[in-house]
Amino acid sequence: IFVDIDLPASEEGPQRGGAGLIGLLKSNPRTSRIPIIATVEGSESLLGCLAEAETLVSLKKPYQVNRLCFHLKEIMAILGGDPRLNEWKWLGEVSAGDLPLVAEYEVLRALRFKQNLSCVSIVLRERVPAAESALLIDWVYGALPQPLCRSAHVFLEAGRELVLLLPQTTVEEANSIFGQLKSQAANFNGFGALAVGFAGCRESNVTSGIGLLACARGAWRKQNST
């Protein structure tokens, strides 16, 4: 469970704020065995938090899915042989099946914090074998400019469509990034774009992850039909 230490205090009950929530979770037999990751953005007082949370991490809002996943794997490594790990397990990196959920999260985050968010849908010339999909995704992450590679999401759908979700990135910037990927394509033989579509949360005036994906895919379909 991720608990934000900066949660506002409740007006009811003896427990207040994020630290109070951790105390409630640890005092309840039904939730006491679930590891807790306490998050804090600044240098606020942490008195009492580390005593009950398994670990404390510094995360700036708005949270990024990749950073949450990183810290989740980190705490599992710290717990090591803890018997609680027999009751729950890490299911791996976000996969293509997680695309709609991650897109929805990123759109809501962009709208709430009034940030740019772009989606790039790339149809590959050839289907990428399952054994090489991880290599392609790693190559794309490595080809993205810093610090975007730490906040971007890269998915491979059905071995044929690459989807990039690029937080705090305009469509114009996304187009430039795609150009950089094409210029480095010689470093990865499996990357060859048949069609590409761009969509921006602000530019396309979308309010949902599904809508953003549809706009990006619609763009390359329109391009391909002409």
Image: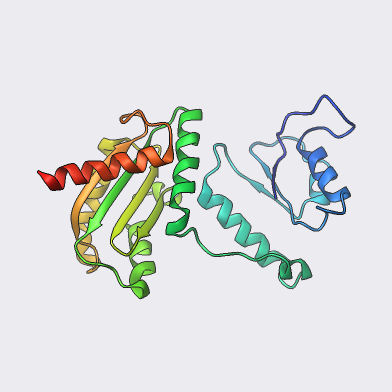
Q: Quick check: 117 left or right of 217?
A: right
Residue at figure coordinates x 67%, y 64% from the top left: 76
Q: Which residue occupies the foreground of this view, 176 or 123?
A: 123
Residue 70, given in percent of the width and then of the height, sits at: 56, 57
Q: Is residue 212 above or below residue 178?
A: above
Snapshot quadrant of residue 115: top left
Q: Which residue occupies the foreground of this view, 98 or 111?
A: 98
Q: Which residue occupies the foreground of this view, 54 or 220?
A: 220
Residue at figure coordinates x 24%, y 55% from the top left: 123
Residue 124, given in percent of the width and then of the height, sits at: 23, 60
Q: Which residue occupies the foreground of this view, 38 or 212?
A: 212
Residue 174 appears in the figure: no
Numbered label tally: 0
Residue 218 appears in the figure: yes
Residue at figure coordinates x 29%, y 49% from the top left: 121
As drawn, the residue found furthest toward the left would be 226
